[in-house]
Image (cartoon, helix red, strand yellow):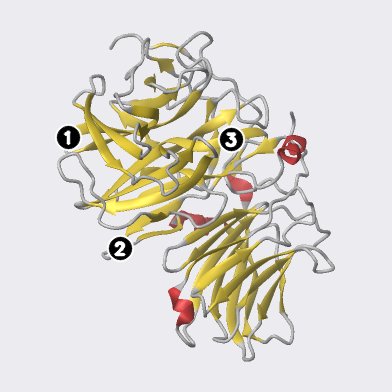
Amino acid sequence: MATPPADPHLPAVHLRPPRNWINDPNGLVFHEGHYHVFFQYNPHGPQHANMHWGHFRSPDLITWEQLPVALAPTPGGDDADGCFSGNAISVDGRLLAFYSANRTGRWWQPVTTAESYDGGHSWTKRPELLIPQPPADTTMYRDPYVWQQDGRWRMLVGSALADGRGAALLYESDNLENWVYRGPFHAGGLAATGDPVGWECPQYATFGDRGVLIVSDWTPQGGPSHVTVHTGREEEGRFPATAAPVPLDHGPDFYAPALLRAPGEDRWLLWGWAWEARDDSWAHEAGWAGALTLPRELTLADDGTVSQRPARELLALRGERVLHRTGNVTRSGPTELGPVSRSFDLTATLTPDPAGTTGLRLVTSADGTEYLDISLDPAAGRLTVDRGHASLDVRARAGAYSLPCPAAKVPAAPVELRVIVDGSIAEIYLATGQVLTLRFYPIGDGPWRLQAHSTGPGAGGFTVEAWDLDPGGIHREPLLAAQGQGDMTAR
């Protein structure tokens, strides 16, 4: 199904093909001068089915090239019903992908591999599964994540234990072929409701002798749920967390993030899947569903706080500065800040009225009835994003979502944030490292414009700058067929 060329909700600078379904980012790897981003992809329609691995690459995180589909199901093979999620490494001049082989009716997804010697243009699958069976006492098993540490190869696999807890299972290898199971690397607690929880897409980043484990919570009742981050220090193949798990992203539309260690520096990059927040019928009409977030930098502070910010390279996406306003606003009425495009990058410093809320409003209809609200609440110490009026189409999901902002409670203290809006995606970052990802679908007659607003008896202060985003670096091609899906010969 072709995507209407004028679809206003299609992101301009977020990675996704021009049509059809995508979900989890996979196989993030730097290889021979390029960042490679693979992703779950249905080349035949805007629904979760026929899972392939789509493929983009970039030399700089700005200019992206869409390459042929990397992995496709083999009819009658172990992955006949989908090449599901995993990761990739660069080793010995080749790309080696580890992924979940899906067959309908098999509750576990065994681990298998494919390799490429031409930068990901063509791939050869191994003739048999790498890890064909899950360990005993597991009820879910999928999504390998492989990395090298202290001269050995290590793998985490997402799982659910028979007692109902989510777990990341650890394997180790000296040669990438023979893997030894070491047991649960980390497991969650029992759910308060008693319902089982599984962990999908485990990701692990090291910061000196400390580690960050990211898992995507999945339940048999509801499917994908949310993403949590666990921090701690590894002790002989186990990862006892030193703090309670916390959300990685506070928005409703973020799942299955994947990590990549940037080459030549101690910097971790992260992409996530921003799923749709509208009825399936609307996505089918549009011919596409899902997008990847922009790349983020992940850091771990001395106090154990995990922080995120947009990758520094993204500043190069900024085009013309379209807005620069400083002033105060009262509850007597909003202050008009000026027009913005459908894809913009905004920085703001807000000083809230201590007795009310202060924030920004993105107005998307001429009469002002359609808008997205971002507000600081000093009493609650939170920043809230409300999409209850963000679409005049009832097929779009509503709801208000918030993230902690203790600085808002401090009288006269400015709060810095960055907001990147792209078609139907908003990524809102606090300077302290918390982030909220949200989808919204304006259908108003525009043009889009920004306002500052306040509800307190005093005044709220604001300084706002905004830049249009330049999508010229993303080269999306028509659907490209997979190549080289033969069996891997022994090496």
How far separated are the C-alphas under marks 3 and 2?
33 Å
Q: Which mark is residue 151?
A: 1
Q: Position of residue 382 (x, y in %)?
A: 51, 71
Q: Position of residue 150 (x, y in %)?
A: 17, 39
Q: Residue at x 44, y 43 (%)?
A: 216
User: Which of the two discs, 1 and 3, sits closer to the camera?
Assistant: 3
Q: Is residue 399 left or right of residue 173?
A: right
Q: Amino acid at mark 1?
A: Gly
Mark 1 Cα-neighbour bin, 10 Å: few <14, some 14–19, many ≥20: few
How far separated are the C-alphas under marks 1 and 2?
26 Å
Mark 3 vs mark 2: which is more N-terminal? 3
What kind of element bears circle 2? loop
Quadrant of the image for the N terminus? top right
Q: Amino acid at mark 2?
A: Ala
Quadrant of the image for the C terminus? top left
Q: Residue at x 67, y 54 (%)?
A: 440
What kind of element bears circle 1? loop
Q: Which mark is residue 301?
A: 2
Q: Residue at x 79, y 56 (%)?
A: 392
Badge 3 vs badge 2, beta-carbon distance below 8 Å: no
Q: Which mark is residue 162?
A: none
Mark 2 Cα-neighbour bin, 10 Å: few <14, some 14–19, many ≥20: few
Q: Amino acid at mark 3?
A: Ile
Q: Quadrant of residue 120?
A: top left
Q: Quadrant of residue 131?
A: top left
What kind of element bears circle 3? strand
Residue with the mark numbered 3: 22
Taking the image as drawn, is residue 256 in sight? yes
Q: Is residue 247 left or right of residue 328?
A: left
User: Which of the two discs, 1 and 2, sits closer to the camera?
Assistant: 2
